[in-house]
Image: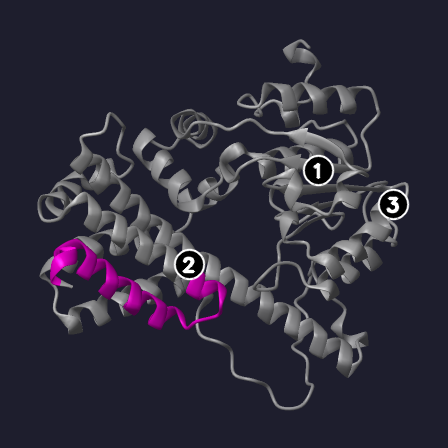
Amino acid sequence: MTSDAVPQALSKLTLQPRVQEFLARAVTSGQVGQSYLFLGDATSGMMDAALALARCIVCPNGGCDSCDECRRVTHRTHPDVRVLEPEGVSGYMVEQIRALTEDAALTPSRGQHKVYIVSGADGLRDASANALLKTIEEPPSFVTFILLASARDAVLPTIVSRCQLVPFAHIEPAAAARALELSCGATGTNALIALTVAGTPDGARAWLTSATRPEARRIAVNDVAALPAADAWDVICYAREIVEKALEPFGEPAPKSKGRKKPARKKNADPSATVEEDFLSDAALRKLEDARKRALSQSKRSAIIEVIAAVESLLRDVLITLERADQTIVNADVVELVRRLAAGTTPAGVVRALDACAHARLDLSRNVNPNLTFEVMLFSVKEALTCPPSSR
């Protein structure tokens, strides 16, 4: 397929040429399916491709990438394009999927189509998967579902059988970083760091433009490098400092209001971006508030996990340095810190430190307090880096 036959919205999917050609043919021939299952790892660009396809679907020009509809999809403010993330600790909650299926039955707000992008579809457990299956079996004619999962076997077979499978090739980090450089002008080092910490090209772009996330990574990297010489109180302070910076964008929880008085609606507010809470029952309001709390908790966990990823990246660079492996280190901006840590530890110690990070991720998935999680992790990393196994 020639480049001029590829819709502009799909033009940036150059690292996935087969996916680009497949989606372009579907769009240009007017044969976009109603259910897709994108399969690939976190860095393969599945979310970018899903949003690009969504732009093609809702755009009156077939994915021009410059109209108001396309811009709204890109900024995730289009009322007819929804991106879902698991709200439960172990995956999607059945109430979340039921709300999706009820919304899917409603006609589009702005155009003729609706798109639902279900990220982490391997987090659909039996109840939630079956709730979605009923809609995917007989979807409204104006709805397209795009499910994203790491592997086919992780998704309910009956859902797989009703979707068009779109496999994504693994992308080497260096190639992904080069693509990120071209798309947002980041330097090579910053692009590679962003991809490593955020995990996906879409997340990396958001990370690079954040006012606080790169700073949280900087603090975490410097504090971990200082662990070998730190005392117990230092470690506790480091944990508090890292968590506070990671959670800074979320601020302090707002005080609970008395009664059911609702805030005045802003003038000229976009009705498509708000929920008409004035007409909801007490039970519906409680459900809405619970959903918001779950989404906030998930976002906070993601912010902490992102900082853990930064620590893991630093430790892997230390291991590469110790093993004299022929690999490019990610954290080239703090190469002196990497060398300093490598000079005072062993490969076995770094492996144990990485294990401590993995345990921290598991603790977060079990809703362990973030401050406590980081304190335990940093103490374990310090011990692993400075104490040989025989002395433990």
**Helix, strand or loop at mark 1:** strand
The residue carrying pointer 2 sits among few (fewer than 14), some (14 to 19) or many (20 or more) residues within 10 Å by Cα, namely: many
* Marks 2 & 1, CB-CB < 8 Å contact: no
Structural distance between the alpha carbons of marks 2 and 1: 27 Å
* Marks 3 & 1, CB-CB < 8 Å contact: no
Q: Which residue is mark 3?
A: 137
Query: From the image, which quarter does the C terminus lie in?
Result: bottom left
Q: Mark on residue 1?
A: none
**Is residue 118 shown above or below 182?**
below
- Closest to the observer: 269 or 225? 225
Q: Which residue is mark 1?
A: 37
Q: Which residue is mark 2?
A: 361
Query: From the image, which quarter does the N terminus lie in?
Result: top right
**In this rendering, position of residue 178 left or right of residue 94:** left
- Tell me the residue at 87%/45% (across/down): 137
In the rendered structure, which segment of residues is drawn in magenta? 362-391
- Residue 265 in percent (x, y) is at 68, 70
